[in-house]
Image: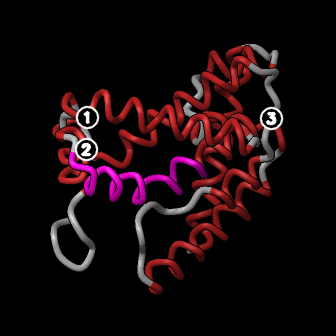
Amino acid sequence: MGEGTWGPSDEALLAGLASGDEEATAAFVRRFHRRVYGLAFLILGDADAASDVVQETFLRVWRHAEAFDPRRGAVGPWVLSIARNLAVDQLRLRRWSPVEPATLWLAAGPSGEPGPEERAIADAEAEQLHRALGELPLEQRRAVVLAAFYGRTAREISELESVPLGTVKTRIRSALLKLRAALEVDR
């Protein structure tokens, strides 16, 4: 995204943040605050804890802005990965409490500011995936959501769910195959 009606690119705002440009910093925070807070709240289910994650995320972004390498990925996913890691770390400090996969899917939306046509397409695709997720057995749904949305490894899911590693891998693979089949049929 370049200069123009959408404003400066994410990279330009990050460079401004790194150089101490107050206007760029404010624009950067405005651009990512909602997504960072939403992700943190989704993972933690607690507004105060999510706000703490937001503050820590932007502090870490500021500290590491100069080291950001656009060859390794875009700014948005980098910021969200920092937020996700902080939220997961905070979650690990508390008692683990699972989130219903449907709640995760409803809260996860495309990033950026899509137009009406893109929103309609995304909404239709989200509804298809939501229906397909709802048709999965609970164990498979939880395993695939923990892996896909939380970035948990099969080993971590095995420990969280207190089931053998092989069982978790089978659940994830089965869920992905069923989702693929359900989404291909709907198209």
Real-space Cα separation, disc 3 to disc 1, in angstroms: 33 Å
Q: Is residue 44 left or right of residue 116?
A: right
Depicted 171 relative to depicted 135: above or below: above
- Looking at the image, residue 76 lies above or below residue 161: below
- Segment tinted magenta in the rendering: 21-38
Q: Earlier in the sequence, mark 1 or mark 2?
A: 2
Residue underneath mark 3: 98
Return the disc, 3 or 1, that comes first in the chain's sequence: 1
Is the N terminus in the top left, top right, bottom left or bottom right quadrant? bottom left
Give whichever of discs 2 and 3 has the lower sequence position.
2
Give me the disc on residue 11: none
How far apart, in angstroms, are the residues tagged by discs 2 and 3?
36 Å
Most extreme residue toward the bottom is: 116
Residue at x 75% of width, y 41% of height: 46
Q: Amino acid at mark 2?
A: Leu
Q: Residue at x 31, y 50 (%)?
A: 25
Evaluate if marks 1 and 2 touch, with contact meaning CB atoms under 8 Å apart: yes
Residue at image mark 2? 17
Badge 2 vs badge 3, beta-carbon distance below 8 Å? no
Q: Amino acid at mark 3?
A: Pro
Give the labeled residue for mark 1. Answer: 65
